[in-house]
Image: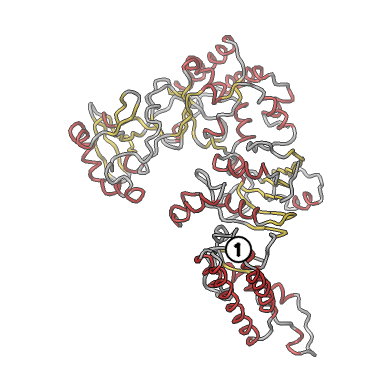
Amino acid sequence: YGVDIQPVAIQISKLRFFISLIIDQKIDDTRPNRGVRPLPNLETKLVAANTLIGLDAQAMLKPGEVNNLEKELKQVRSKIFRARTPSTKLKWRTKDKEIRTEIADLLKQTGYAPDAADKIANFSPENQDAFADWFDAEWMFGIEKGFDIVIGNPPYLRVQGLQQTQPEMIPIYREKYKSAQGSFDIYGLFIESGYNLLSDKGQFSYIVPHKFFQASFGKSLRDLLGRKKALRQIVRFGAEQIFDEATTYTCLLFLSKQSQNSFDFIEISKIKENVGVFEHISKNLVSDNHQRETLDAPKTDDWDFQIGDKDKLLKKLQKQTTKLGDITRKIFQGIATSADKIFVLKVLQERDKTIVCYSKQIESEIEIEKGLLKPFLMGKDVHRYELPEAKNVVIFPYQIRLGKAELMSQKFIQDNFPKGWEYLLENKNTLAERENYRFEKDWHCFSRPQNLTEFASPKIMTPEIALGCQMTFDNQGTLYHTTKVYSFVFKENYIKNTNYLLGLLNSKVLWFFLSSTGYVLRGGYYTFKTNYLTPFPIPKATNAQQTEIAEIVDEIIEAKKLAPNADTQELEDAIDCLVYQLYGLTDEEIAIVEGKT
């Protein structure tokens, strides 16, 4: 049986089945039609429908007459499947419609939801060009106790994409699915739906992104599958790409309806060099291209799956009682304007009271008062230990008062920053149209004005995506930045130790931790986001140990001030050695951190 919301996908599936059946036929020229048997009618096996939406009032008891008609309908569809002539097919299709109408009428008489009853009556498997906005295995296929196998490649689309294509479905999905929480991805709903379609001993196999293992939007799904002890096997491809068309980081997810106390976890390091790795996996053979281990079923929603020596080292690091999240007041993302081409400007010339800038939006030079601007960093401006240089500014239409960011009134901007006001006014229509005119009244605001009060604090900054740790320090608290940069603001009693913390966070230990527990991207890059950073274990260190690292960091920063390309590797290696001592790492563990084993 097969289901897809796109009718063309169903038609292509039928064609592929037909081709497979035809090439297996044995030709006999002495028999009618050369011995080729008529192909089956697959419309009763493959339907176009929305798998994520079921019928309402499912739990209502059905009268015996309906149960009898259901059995008759199942027999009729079996006859349609095997019909060999057009007249026979038409006969049973007509009977199919009669039974569906009779069932719907009986259901309405017993209080079944009229809308659901009509959907049953109107569902016609023979319609090749339409899809049903619902799916029910019992009514469509006669399957009452679930499927033995559910297999597929569901669509991958975040809720932001759904907002553009089917916004009316989002509240329905949130109501029906535990996995539709936060900024969810629709593949999570398909996992939950597919698991629910299984029979008592059913097996499930999807190819899906493994991002839900760590991402906050996957918490509810991890909790659901964990409580059911559903994991049977995971084959994770890491940064290896399976699909040529798009960059997606995937895994094979195998679930079982029967509770599993343990599951096989397989990590593939190379696939394109040796596609035979799958044969090795299926036969449980040893291969240089993959690692395999049996893990206990997760008891929490923490799916930080690791195997081998890395796992032992991570567990040792995690024995530290203090985490990065414990010593930071906040780890936050940069400013989201939803109109960077308007708000973010390239600096051309600084004058006494104004700055001459270039606007990508109007492709022209403009002049704006300094009081309306803040120095602004892009992701490419943030480098390891280097003093950041802001080559851009952002129009900042907010005032910070009593620890709160208040949007400037339009009159205030007009009276105090007439040049800035003139530029904003020129772009009023574009700003007002953002997010379907959501900001029509306060059209000059940022779309997400969170964390605006935090930028004025001394902070460690990191690019969102990096190959290795690329953190630096804004000790004056004067720099603002894009969403492609994250900042760490520390609690009061840790601020004085910022240089020590900068050395710790630029160490090979943090990179090992993040690359073992975080989210990998193509080329071995990782994302330095809040959820992946806050669990980082912070070692206990005496004042003397902190000072020793901080002084080396000072040397590196001074060298970078004189020459950004200065070779400071020897100093950075010295910091790593001191950090290894803080964690009590052995030579073998250091080799693992440095990727030498």
For the point 66% across and 46% down, the residue is 237
Front residue of 254/474: it is: 254
Q: Which residue is mark 1?
A: 136
Indicate the secondary structure of the residue bearing disc 1: loop
Query: Horizontally, is 372 left or right of 415 in the view?
Result: right
Query: Horizontally, is 185 left or right of 427 in the view?
Result: right
- Residue extending furthest toward the left: 415
Front residue of 226/558: it is: 226
**Image-quadrant location for residue 314:** top right
**Residue 88 appears in view:** yes
**Image-quadrant location for residue 73:** bottom right
Which image quarter is the N terminus in? bottom right
**Residue 15 appears in view:** no
For the point 65% across and 36% down, the residue is 300
Category of crowding for the residue at label 1, using alpha-carbon neighbours closer than 10 angstroms: few (below 14), some (14–19), many (at least 20)? many
For the point 42% across and 20% down, the residue is 475
Examine the rendered structure and indicate whether residue 273 appears above or below residue 46: above
Query: Horizontally, is 181 left or right of 517 in the view?
Result: left
> Where is residue 596 drawn, in percent x and y?
71, 31
Name the kind of residue labelled 1 in the image: Asp
Which image quarter is the C terminus in? top right
Query: Horizontally, is 357 left or right of 155 in the view?
Result: left
> Where is residue 523 drawn, in percent x and y?
59, 42
Examine the rendered structure and indicate whether residue 72 appears above or below residue 266: below
Examine the rendered structure and indicate whether residue 388 appears above or below residue 27: above
> Where is residue 359 drawn, in percent x and y?
30, 42
> Where is residue 595 drawn, in percent x and y?
68, 32
Front residue of 486/254: it is: 254
The colour mode here is secondary structure
Across the whole image, how many numbered discs are drawn on residues? 1
